[in-house]
Amino acid sequence: MAESLFIGGGGENYAVAEELLLKYGNRHGLIAGATGTGKTITMQIMAEEFSRAGVPVFLTDVKGDVGGMAVAGTPRDSFQRRADQIGLGPLSYEAMPVTFWDLFGQMGHPVRTTIADMGPLLLSRVLELTEAQEGVINVAFRLSDEEGWPILDLDDLRAMLGFLGENQREMSEKYGNVTTASIGAIQRRLLVLENQGAANFFGEPALAISDLIRTSSEGRGQVNILHAARLMETPRLYATFMLWLMSELFEELPEVGDAEKPKMVFFFDEAHLLFDGAPKALVDKVEQVARLIRSKGVGIYFITQDPDDVPEDVLGQLGNRVQHALRAFTARDQQALRRAAQTYRPNPRFDTEAAIREVGVGEAVTSFLEAKGVPGIVERTLIRPPASAMGPCDEGTRRQVIAASPMGRKYDTPVDRDSAHEMLARRAGKAAEEAGRAEEQADEGFTRARRYSPNSSRSRRVNEEAPTSRSSSRSSSSRSSRSDSVTEAFTKSMARSIGTRAGSAIVRGVLGSLFRGR
């Protein structure tokens, strides 16, 4: 097994191989540079190299231009000349073992998880909930566990929140204060998330992490490509997905210590879309996961235009760096360029700041971790050519790859099993049936009561035979009429209020008291 990945040629006349040590592939990395300088191709050749070494790869295809990895590249004279210049030798062109994924299920196999798998803490971070609102979410999850009402999708969570609202007093007495305001705020946050496409993300069958960490029959790591062109328009959903995926990996994978190679490597393109406007709690969570997941053998590589796009606390953990050209036309750009140059271990042969400004397309300033994890001296490097096709693959090829994948049989058809939404709907239906029966009983009891009321025909005959005055008869009739109207109003009012088992019990008790004497 190779111990390093050949990235390109550096040193004098690019005669020295610039390599990333495989055992430090989980130390995270950064690929930065202005638009059109070659960041995507660098991501592609690094993904190819990891795959050849048997390391599964997951990358986000933001612009739809890395699908060509499923197809062998086209031989080019310029590629071979570069390969000769950097000491790579004869090029071989080949397709990578690719699996296409898509949160919306259109350009790849659907990616789903359940609300229960995400958990109350991560969900609260994504929704930016206050402490009180997070408490309500925890109550919903606790009730779900106690009653056996699974929370799988957004409908289930809404049903649980609705139940909390309808039984607010009992829930508050049992779990602490559950307010209508908090429930309403959570519902509105869920609506925002749903409008960004989360209804497709939450559900079953949920993605099994083991299906991402696969190798081909030739021992090559599976290259999982997430179609993210539409996903980039919904940054909150993108952040939700990224945090869930890394959190799942952290929870499921065992500690590996200093392994010979990573368990898996992630490439997140256009990383600035993840961090722009992100709340501090979300950034803190990304930093925490990035710091801890390294011990599970998972490497994360951020691809962005400017290193400043990545928060400083996260940037400090990125040991393997490929810096393509940065443009410095304004004072702010010049400051950013200066800061980027200062993060590298200097090379006495050239000025790092000038080199970052001058490197051409397909060329970069690189620094990879050396023995004992020490950052290497910065070098100007010619990036090696890719073996697979550059750019997007055609629609026919994509469909063939999707159809041939075993993941289709497992994930393409959604499953809507019995969960909180259905269970609470049946509960409400049963309560409605009981309410209907109780109302019928109330109407029957009311009818029987009227037969023996002072206004009935039998009572009138008795009153006519009795030697009472006209005024006394009118008074008695008036009192009976008022009594009858009060009884009728009370009975019907109670009948309408029996939406729950408790209401039904109350009505049955009251009606029993009214007619027990008869």
Image (cartoon, grey):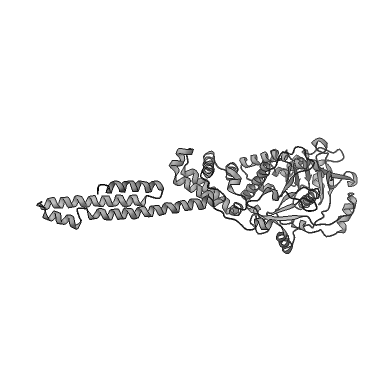
Q: Position of residue 297 (x, y in %)?
A: 74, 41
Q: Position of residue 470 (x, y in %)?
A: 11, 53
Location of residue 415 by image quarter:
bottom right
The vertical placement of 505 against 316, above or below, is below
Q: Closest to the observer: 134 or 185? A: 134
**For the view shown, which residue lies furthest in the bottom direction?**
396
Q: Image check: 93 left or right of 472?
A: right
Q: Can I make out residue 93 in this image?
A: yes
Q: Closest to the observer: 282 or 454? A: 454
Q: Can I make out residue 315 in this image?
A: no
Q: Closest to the observer: 209 or 302? A: 209
Q: How many badges with numbers are in the image?
A: 0
Q: Closest to the observer: 266 or 481? A: 481
Q: Position of residue 411 (x, y in %)?
A: 65, 55
Q: Quadrant of the N terminus?
A: top right
Q: Position of residue 20 (x, y in %)?
A: 81, 43
Q: Image check: 192 left or right of 245?
A: left
Residue visible at 80% across and 39% down in the picture = 369
